[in-house]
Amino acid sequence: MTDGTSSSDFQVSKYLQLMARYERLMEITRQLNSVLDLGSLLLKIIDASIELTRTEQSSILLIDPTTGELRFEASSSLSGGAMEQIVVPMEGSLAGWVATNGEPVLVENTQADTRWFSKIDKTIKFETRNLLGVPMIAHGKVIGVVEVINKVNEQEPWTEDDVNTLSALAAQAAIAIENARLFQQSDFVAEMVHELRTPLAALKLSTTLLLRPTLDENTRDDTIGTMATEIDRLIRLTTDFLDLARLESGRARLELEHFDVLTLAKESLQVVEQQAHDKHVELVADGTSIMSHGDRGKVKQVLLNLLTNAIKYNKPAGGEVRCSVRQLDGTEGFCLVEVRDTGLGISKENQEKMFQKFFRVSDTAEAVQGTGLGLVIAKRIVEAHGGEMWMESELGVGTAFSFTLPMSQQ
């Protein structure tokens, strides 16, 4: 009788736990469908995966629609820079098997499974003991894989409920990811079209003027000059649009190499030397020689954007732009790069908008030409390396833009 009662109580307890898990799953999926920012959405899926399966780590791998490669897009254990370095093979990995077959896989002992891809553990110095991976399927097509790793309680066995719960979460996550991608694309296209209208309208007006038979020579020359300026603006806009679209969609891949950050800073200062000379702005580089592992070309793009802006918005004469490189205090593995000017400064209100697409400070928008995308692109590049970018400014004193980069481990 006692044994029967204990067994019955146990079954009731298990049933209540299962119901609580599915109620939590329903609550999470409702939250996912309301998130349209892809980065925030992926992090919510990661947190939900860990919570629902009571595991140590979780990762999301998405299939690149262009190359067909399987890559990390979010992880509780990998930095952005580390994720960029790893391409997970379709053959020779558990995630690849899930993506190829469109079925879940549960491995109690990864070391004994020939499909296990050990490079990740070696890269982050982590031990994967057991793993559950499920496909994310949208419109009948596998778009990626959700993995959860290592039960928190080693004595707790994996169950069919774990597989079913994570599969249900992955199904909802796939729909939410596709919706976020569509929203991102449509929002970006709308912004792009809006920005293109101004130079296109200017070109149309210029064309109309040129067709007038009574147009005098000076006006004709001015109109042709306006057309050349607007064409250059269109070229800059389309180039920046493409750069940002690749970065936000994850299609822009880093060409990783080891390089000296201070040397790159000095090289970038040489590129803008004539521009600084024309405005009587002094260029200074200081700091220590630090090796980083990243995309040298893209980091140079970030530096040139910050240096060009610092010169543009500096004092009319006698200003200074200083580029400094040093190890980040209190944080191992990252260096700090700072570009500081002695220019106009930026108000508190405008500082909050500096990393928004197409935003330009109203006081200087007419005086200084630009697309309003340079800082957004620079920030995305830094974040793709696993770093951060921020700014400090005081009106009448100047502005400093800072960002972090991973230091080379070799």
Image (tube, rainbow, N blue to C red):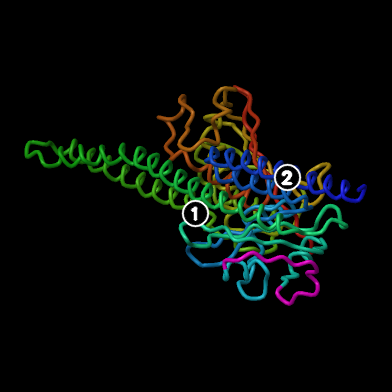
Q: Residue at x 65, y 41 (%)?
A: 389
Q: Which residue is mark 2?
A: 336
Q: Please determine whether, in this image, residue 203 is positioned above or below residue 386.
A: above
Q: CA distance from mark 1 to mark 2?
A: 26 Å
* Magenta span contains residue 104: yes
Q: Which residue is mark 1?
A: 246
Q: Residue at x 46, y 28 (%)?
A: 364
Q: Residue at x 39, y 44 (%)?
A: 189
Tell me the SS state at disc 1.
helix
Amino acid carrying label 2: it is Leu
Q: Residue at x 88, y 47 (%)?
A: 6
Q: Residue 4: percent from the left, percent from the top?
A: 87, 50
Q: Is residue 279 left or right of residue 3?
A: left
Mark in the foreground, 1 or 2: 1
Residue positioned most to the right? 2
Q: Is residue 179 left or right of residue 202?
A: right
Extent of the magenta region: 102-115
* Magenta span contains residue 96: no
**Mark number, residue 365:** none
Q: Residue 66: percent from the left, percent from the top?
A: 47, 64
Q: Residue 129: percent from the left, percent from the top?
A: 82, 64
Amino acid carrying label 1: it is Arg
Of the image marks 1 and 2, the number of the one nearer the N terminus = 1
Q: Residue 292: percent from the left, percent from the top?
A: 72, 57
Tell me the SS state at disc 2.
strand
Nearest the eye: 205 or 215: 205
Q: Is residue 149 left or right of residue 372?
A: right
Nearest the eye: 138 or 329: 138
Check the picture and name the quadrant holding the C terminus: bottom right
